[in-house]
Image: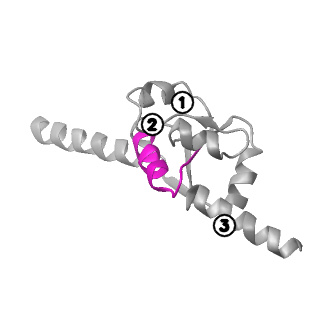
Amino acid sequence: SPMLRSLVGSEMCIRDSIYSQQPIIDIDFERMSEVLKRESTVLIDVRTADEYNSFRIKSSINIDYYSPSFLDSISSYKAKKNIIFYCRSGRRSYYAAKLVQQKGFNMIYNLKGGVLEVKKKNLEFKTLNN
């Protein structure tokens, strides 16, 4: 019947829109360095301006996740092929990634462990180099 067909049809649309969302890909610092070499990639630090000014990853852009204008600011990067988020521990960046995932962004990456992990890694490298 037409009624049944329209119900099934709308259910398909809902299912498709869920599946058309890109997965959020957790990456470590090494993998992030590789992704950053690709064209049309942006690295977003979602921490506060104070946190950003005290320590940041080179070439990152600061857009505070808690800022009321976060979605507006981030939407100007929707055309980018790759967007990488990071924060202090990986939690805010994951929430930010979830948010843009629902907005239909392309490849979405989350730096696992955030700045804490990067600092730990760098310390490890420094001790290895001695």
Is residue 28 in view? no
Q: Nearer the viewer, mark 2 or mark 3?
A: 3
Q: Which residues are magenta?
A: 84-100
- Asked which quadrant contains residue 11, the reply is top left
The residue wearing badge 1 is 78
Would you call the spot at circle 1 few (<14 residues within 10 Å), some (14-19), or many (20 or more)? some
* Label 3 close to label 1 by CB (< 8 Å): no
Q: Quadrant of the C terminus?
A: bottom right
In the picture shown, does residue 11 fall above or below 69?
Answer: below
For badge 3, the amino acid type reads: Lys
Q: Is residue 66 left or right of residue 8?
A: right
- Based on the picture, tell me whether residue 48 belongs to the magenta stretch: no
Under tag 1, what secondary structure? loop
Q: Quadrant of the N terminus?
A: top left
Which numbered dot is residue 120? 3
Q: CA distance from mark 3 to mark 1?
A: 31 Å
Q: Nearer the viewer, mark 1 or mark 2?
A: 1
Q: CA distance from mark 1 to mark 2?
A: 8 Å
* Label 1 close to label 2 by CB (< 8 Å): yes
Check the image and name the residue furthest to the right. Answer: 130
Instruction: Identify which residue is drawn at 75% across, 43% down.
Output: 38
